[in-house]
C-alpha cells in the first residue's frame, strides 16, 4: 500500500526529471494540493469520494501545465541551480496557499469504503485495496502510454536526446507540458488516495517528496521499471520494520540502505551507468 | 594598484567598524536577534559555497549543524565541559562526520551527491528524534546555558546575558570564519577546487587527487556548519531535531544562489538580504512566505548570476549606452 503511493509519486518525479532535466522540488506540494483538492470536493462540496478524486487529479494535471509554462519552461535542460530556485519558490507558494486557505489544523477525508476483505488468507481493508487497485491502474496506463502511443514515444525520444527529438519534428514544448500534466496528475492522485487514510496537513508534501526522491535514486534515475522496483523495496522496508521498531526507524533503515546501495552501485538498481 | 588596494583595505575596515558600532544605534532585542541570525546564516552559506567551489552541492549542511548543536549542548549539559571547549568539539564533530562519510560520498557525482547528503541529514534528524534518553526526543533540549563568561581581570568582562553580547560574539566568529574561508579560496587549494569544479577529469589528468580535495572541501564546509550549529544552540538555548531540517538546507542554498555563487561576496549578500526580506513583509502575516518566494524568483529570472552581479550589469549597461552614442 505504501509502496503504491511511493511509486505514483516517484513516477511523476522521474517523468519531469528525465524530460525537462528539473528536480521538481514542489512535487510533494502538488501531492499535498491533490489531497486537499479531494478533501475540498468530497467534504466541503459533498461529492462522492471517487468523483472528488477524479476532479482533484484532473485539476492537478491542469495546474501542472500552467506551472510548466510559467515556472519551468525558461529553465528546461539548463543550469541546475536556477531551476531549483524556481521549484523551491513554487513549493513555498503552494504551502502558503494551503495554510492560508485551509488552515494548518489537521483535516480528514472520510471515504465510503469501509470494512475488510480477506484474499487468500491476507486481511486487507477496502480503503487500502482501492489504493492498490487505482495506483496499479495508473502505472499500467502510464507504461502503455509510453510504449504504444505517439506522444509516449515522443516523450521517450525527448528524454533520450532533446535536440535530436526536436530535429525529428517533435515539439519539445508540447512534450514538456504533457510530462508535467502527467507528473502532476500522478502526484495529485497519490495525494488524494493518501488523504483517505492519513490526516492532511500543509506540510505533508515534504515526506512524500523525500520518499519519491529516495525511490527514484534507488531505482536509478530515468528508469521507469527501476521506479517500480525501488518503490516496492522501500514500501517493503517501511511495512516490515515498524512492527519491530518504530515508523521513524523504518525511514532511517530505508535512507541508510539507499546510501549503502548508492555507494556500491552509484547508478541505482536498474539505472544505466553514467559516463 | 597600491592605491586601489589601500582604498579596498580602508573600505573593508570602515565596514567592520560600522558593524561593531551597530548595537549603539540598533538596540531593540528583536532587531538584534535578526542580525544575529543573519550572521549565523552568513557562516553557513559561505561554507556551503566552499563545498560548491569543488563542484559539489551539499544539501546536508542542516544535518551537520544539528550534529554540532547537539554535540556542544550535550557536552556542556551532561559532561559539564566549558562551553568554549564544547564549541570547539562541535566544530570538530562536523568535520569528522564529513571525513567519515566523505570518501564514499564524493564518488557520487552531481545530483546523486546532493541527494545522499539530504538522506544523511534525514538520518541525523531521525537519530536525534529517536535516541530519547540522550537527545530528549522530538521536543529537543531546552535551557541550554549561554557561553561561559570571558574574564580578563581588570581589562574586560563579558557575561553573555544580553543580546548585544551575543551580537558581538557572532560578529567576531563570522568575521574570523570569513577570513579563513577567503584565505582558503585564494590559496593553492582554493584554485585546485575551482579546477575540479570546471572539469574534474581534466584536473585528475594533470595529477590532482580529486577525491582527496573534494573530501577536504566537504570537511571544511561541514566544520563551519558544526560551528554554526554550536553557536546557535548556545545563543537560542533551545535545540530540536527539526530546527535545521531539509528546509533549512534549502534556504541556505537559496541564499547562496540568489546572492551569486560565483563570487565570495555572493553568499554574504544573499544571506543578509534574504534574512531581512521576510521580516520586512511581516505585516502580511500568513501571506508572508509569498513575498520571499516572489522576491527570490524575480531575482533569479532577472539576475541569473545573483545579486552581486548587479554592479557589473549596471556598468555594462552604461558603457554599452556610451558605445552607441
Image (tube, coloured by chain):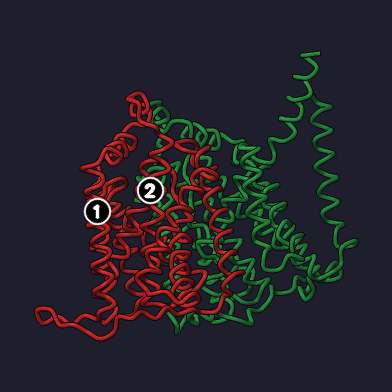
Q: Is residue B42 above or below residue A150?
A: below
Q: Chain of mark 2?
A: B
Apparent side of residue A264 relative to residue A59 in the rendered image (left or right):
left
Chain in red in the render: A
Residue closest to the eye, A15 or B32: A15
Q: What is the CA distance from the residue labelled 2 to the residue labelled 1? A: 29 Å
Name the residue tied to disc 2.
B112
- Which quadrant of the view contains residue A53? bottom left
Instruction: Name the residue furthest right.
Output: B25
Apparent side of residue A35 relative to residue A232 in the rendered image (left or right):
right
Name the residue tied to disc 1.
A141
On the question of residue B35 being in view, the answer is: no
Q: Where's residue A116, x and y in %?
A: 22, 84
Q: Where's residue A192, x and y in %?
A: 39, 68
Q: Chain of mark 1?
A: A
Say yes or no: labels 2 and 1 on the same chain: no
Amino acid at each position: 500500500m505504501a509502496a503504491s503511493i511511493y511509486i505514483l509519486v516517484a513516477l511523476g518525479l522521474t517523468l519531469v526529471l528525465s524530460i525537462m532535466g528539473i528536480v521538481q522540488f514542489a512535487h510533494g506540494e502538488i501531492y499535498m494540493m491533490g489531497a486537499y483538492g479531494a478533501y475540498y470536493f468530497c467534504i466541503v462540496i459533498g461529492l462522492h469520494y471517487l468523483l472528488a478524486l477524479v476532479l482533484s487529479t484532473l485539476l492537478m494535471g491542469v495546474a501542472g501545465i500552467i506551472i510548466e509554462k510559467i515556472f519551468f519552461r525558461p529553465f528546461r535542460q539548463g543550469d541546475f541551480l536556477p531551476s531549483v530556485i524556481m521549484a523551491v519558490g513554487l513549493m513555498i507558494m503552494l504551502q502558503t496557499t494551503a495554510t492560508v486557505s485551509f488552515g494548518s489544523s489537521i483535516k480528514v477525508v472520510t471515504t465510503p469504503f469501509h470494512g475488510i476483505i480477506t484474499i487468500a488468507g491476507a486481511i486487507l481493508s477496502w480503503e487500502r485495496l482501492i489504493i492498490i487497485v487505482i495506483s496499479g491502474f495508473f502505472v499500467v496506463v502510464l507504461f502503455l502510454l509510453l510504449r504504444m502511443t505517439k506522444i509516449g514515444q515522443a516523450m521517450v525520444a525527448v528524454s533520450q536526446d532533446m535536440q535530436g527529438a526536436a530535429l525529428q519534428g517533435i515539439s519539445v514544448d508540447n512534450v514538456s507540458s504533457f510530462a508535467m500534466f502527467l507528473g502532476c496528475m500522478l502526484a495529485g492522485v497519490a495525494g488524494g488516495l493518501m488523504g483517505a487514510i492519513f490526516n492532511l496537513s500543509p506540510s505533508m508534501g515534504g515526506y512524500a517528496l523525500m520518499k519519491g526522491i529516495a525511490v527514484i535514486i534507488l531505482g536509478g534515475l530515468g528508469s521507469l521499471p527501476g521506479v517500480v522496483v525501488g518503490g516496492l523495496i522501500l514500501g517493503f522496508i517501511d511495512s516490515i520494520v515498524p512492527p519491530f521498531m518504530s515508523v521513524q526507524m523504518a525511514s532511517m533503515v530505508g535512507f541508510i540502505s539507499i546510501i549503502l546501495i548508492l555507494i556500491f552501485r552509484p547508478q541505482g538498481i536498474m539505472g544505466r551507468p553514467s559516463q | 594598484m597600491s592605491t586601489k588596494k589601500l582604498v579596498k583595505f580602508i573600505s573593508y575596515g570602515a565596514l567592520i567598524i560600522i558593524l561593531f558600532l551597530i548595537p549603539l544605534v540598533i538596540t531593540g532585542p528583536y532587531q538584534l536577534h535578526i542580525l544575529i541570525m543573519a550572521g549565523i546564516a552568513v557562516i553557513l552559506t559561505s561554507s556551503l559555497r566552499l563545498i560548491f567551489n569543488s563542484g559539489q552541492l551539499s544539501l546536508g549542511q542542516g544535518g551537520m549543524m544539528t550534529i554540532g548543536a547537539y554535540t556542544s549542548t550535550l557536552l556542556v549539559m551532561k559532561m559539564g565541559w566549558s562551553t568554549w571547549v564544547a564549541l570547539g568539539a562541535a566544530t570538530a564533530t562536523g568535520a569528522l562526520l564529513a571525513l567519515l562519510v566523505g570518501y564514499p560520498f564524493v564518488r557520487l557525482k552531481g545530483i546523486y551527491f546532493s541527494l545522499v547528503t539530504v538522506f544523511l541529514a534525514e538520518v541525523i534528524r531521525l537519530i536525534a528524534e529517536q535516541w530519547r534518553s540522550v537527545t530528549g526526543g522530538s521536543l529537543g533540549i531546552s535551557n541550554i546555558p549561554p557561553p561561559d563568561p570571558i574574564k580578563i581581570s581588570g581589562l574586560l568582562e563579558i557575561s553573555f546575558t544580553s543580546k548585544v553580547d551575543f551580537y558581538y560574539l557572532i560578529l567576531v566568529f563570522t568575521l574570523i570564519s570569513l577570513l579563513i574561508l577567503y584565505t582558503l579560496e585564494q590559496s593553492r587549494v582554493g584554485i585546485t577546487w575551482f579546477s575540479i569544479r570546471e572539469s574534474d577529469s581534466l584536473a585528475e589528468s594533470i595529477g590532482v587527487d580529486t577525491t582527496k580535495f573534494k573530501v577536504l572541501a566537504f570537511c571544511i564546509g561541514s566544520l563551519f556548519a558544526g560551528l554554526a550549529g554550536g553557536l546557535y544552540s548556545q545563543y537560542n538555548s533551545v535545540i530540536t531535531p527539526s530546527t535545521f531540517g531539509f528546509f533549512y538546507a534549502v534556504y541556505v542554498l537559496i541564499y547562496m544562489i540568489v546572492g551569486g555563487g560565483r563570487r565570495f561576496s555572493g553568499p554574504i549578500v544573499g544571506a543578509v538580504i534574504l534574512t531581512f526580506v521576510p521580516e520586512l513583509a511581516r505585516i502580511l502575516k500568513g501571506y508572508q512566505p509569498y513575498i520571499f518566494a516572489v522576491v527570490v524568483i524575480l531575482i533569479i529570472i532577472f539576475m541569473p548570476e545573483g545579486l552581486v552581479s548587479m554592479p557589473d550589469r549596471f556598468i555594462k549597461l552604461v558603457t554599452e549606452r556610451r558605445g552607441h552614442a
